[in-house]
């Protein structure tokens, strides 16, 4: 019996994420990408990491957000997100 090899291809979501990463000189976080791509999931990014297209190299970007309750700011929260960058194929 002959074995067939299935080749992996990027989904449209992954292609769009790759374009965002390419366009961002300082890399991009999931939170930043989600603004442009509301349907983006971490699974799509994890596959790109596994396949060697993007990496996180340990860098993070800090964000601060207001906590709003019934239209009034009642506090603040800080986030630290991974920064995704293209893998260099030098």
Image: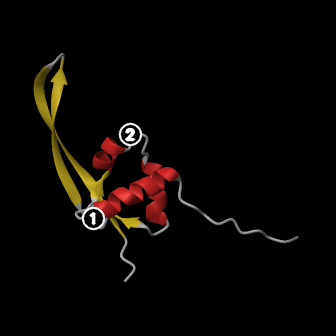
Location of mark 1 (residue): 58
| Direction from residue 19 to residue 79 in the image, left or right | left
Check the picture and name the quadrant holding the C terminus: bottom left
Mark 2 Cα shell of 10 Å, populated few (<14), some (14-19), many (≥20)? few
Q: Nearer the viewer, residue 29 or 17?
A: 17
Closer mark to the observer between disc 2 and disc 1 = 2
Mark 2 lies on a secondary structure that is loop
The residue that appears at 64% across and 66% down in the rendered structure is 7
The residue that appears at 60% across and 63% down in the rendered structure is 8
Q: Position of residue 67 (x, y in %)?
A: 17, 29
Mark 1 lies on a secondary structure that is loop
Q: What sort of colour scheme is used for the picture? A: secondary structure
Query: Residue placed farthest to the top in the image?
Result: 70
Q: Nearer the viewer, residue 21 or 30?
A: 21
Location of mark 2 (residue): 38
The residue that appears at 33% across and 60% down in the rendered structure is 21
Q: Position of residue 3 (x, y in %)?
A: 79, 70
- Contact? badges 2 and 1 (CB < 8 Å): no
Mark 1 Cα shell of 10 Å, populated few (<14), some (14-19), many (≥20)? few
State the separation of the CA atoms marked 2 and 1: 24 Å
Tag shown at residue 5 = none
Q: Is residue 18 above or below residue 32?
A: below
């Amino acid at each position: 019996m002959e074995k067939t090899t299935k080749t992996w291809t990027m989904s449209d979501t992954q292609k769009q994420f790759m374009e965002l990463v390419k366009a961002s000189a300082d890399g991009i976080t999931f939170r930043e990408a989600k603004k442009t791509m509301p349907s983006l999931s971490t699974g799509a990014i994890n596959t790109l990491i596994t396949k060697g297209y993007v990496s996180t190299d340990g860098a993070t970007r800090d964000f601060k957000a207001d906590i709003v309750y019934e239209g009034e700011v009642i506090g603040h929260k800080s986030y630290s997100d991974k920064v995704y960058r293209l893998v260099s194929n030098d």
